[in-house]
Image (spheres, rainbow, N blue to C red):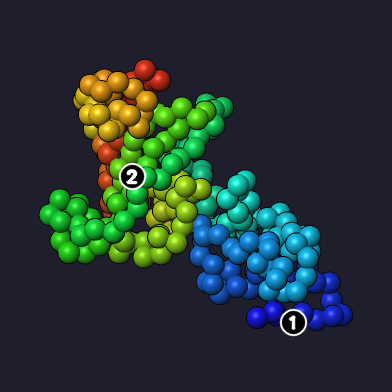
Amino acid sequence: MMENLDADKPKYIQIREIIRDEIEDGLYEPGSAIPSENDLAERFGTTRLTVRNAIDALVAGGLLRRVQGKGVYVMSERLGEADALELVGFRESVREKNAVPSVKILSKARRPAGGFFSHLFEIGENDDILAIKRVNYVDDVPLMIERTFIPISLFPKIESVDVGVFSLYQVYGMFGHTVASAVEHLDMVELGTRDAHLLGIEEGSAVISYECVSYDEDGIALEFASSYRRGDLGGYSITY
């Protein structure tokens, strides 16, 4: 149904304020996409250019973010806090090296916590966690396979966030849990056929096995991440 606008006021300003109000009212969650320009133009009975002007104003104000080829996403007031961390996620660390990061999500699904994650996250064994498997790329070259497990009880709206656009550390910050510390374990393993294919290397190739538990300032475990990283594209440098 088309929504009527006041004929005596500039349409782009009215659309801007309507979208702003809907974000503030929680209709669009931080990290989620708003409707397309075409859909909004149809909703308000106007042109894409008018809608674009409204969106551009919200982008300039930091409330929205354009992502090329994907759409326009809702930002969070806490996002700047997450970006300022010394502990940073994959994308932030790659950008610091003047390279271009990208992420391909292979799967994202709920599953019961089970014994290990029940103990780690201090939840029930049948409580849901979110399991995400993805491949991280640097300059379009596959670098790392990552499996991440997140307690949904801490982030009940996390499934509305496009984790192909925002880093998980950014997402945690959006929901009020800034990453403050991490415990890591490194090893070397040989990859099987499927994972080796995903990284574009030969079966049996040695890779860096990396496990990490990230915590917030209150010592609450936010995620368990397990990764396989190609050693031929650089290793780790750790400073104590």
Identified by mark 1, the residue type is: Asn
Any part of residue 178 in sight: yes
Q: Secondary structure at mark 2?
A: strand
Towards the viewer: 112 or 97? 112
Q: Are dots 2 and 1 in contact, CB under 8 Å? A: no
Number of residues whose C-alpha sits closer than 10 Å to that of mark 1, classed few (under 14), some (14–19) or many (20 or more): few
Estimate the x, y position of residue 161 in percent, counting from the top left: 46, 57
Estimate the x, y position of residue 116 in percent, counting from the top left: 15, 50
215 is higher (above) or lower (below) than 57? above
Q: Residue at x 54, y 72 (%)?
A: 27
* Side of 84 where 63 appears, left or right: right
Q: Residue at x 23, y 55 (%)?
A: 121
Q: Residue furthest right?
A: 8
Any part of residue 170 in sight: no
Q: Residue at x 62, y 46 (%)?
A: 68
Can you tell which mark lies on residue 4?
1
Can you tell which mark lies on residue 17?
none
Number of residues whose C-alpha sits closer than 10 Å to that of mark 2, classed few (under 14), some (14–19) or many (20 or more): some
* Side of 29 where 10 appears, left or right: right
Quarter of image, res 228: top left
The count of marks equals 2
Towards the viewer: 66 or 89? 66
189 is higher (above) or lower (below) than 160? above
Image quarter where the N terminus lies is bottom right
Identified by mark 2, the residue type is: Lys
Determine which residue is flagged by label 2: 133
Q: Secondary structure at mark 1?
A: loop
Q: Residue furthest left?
A: 115
Q: Earlier in the sequence, mark 2 or mark 1?
A: 1
Estimate the x, y position of residue 55 in percent, counting from the top left: 70, 60
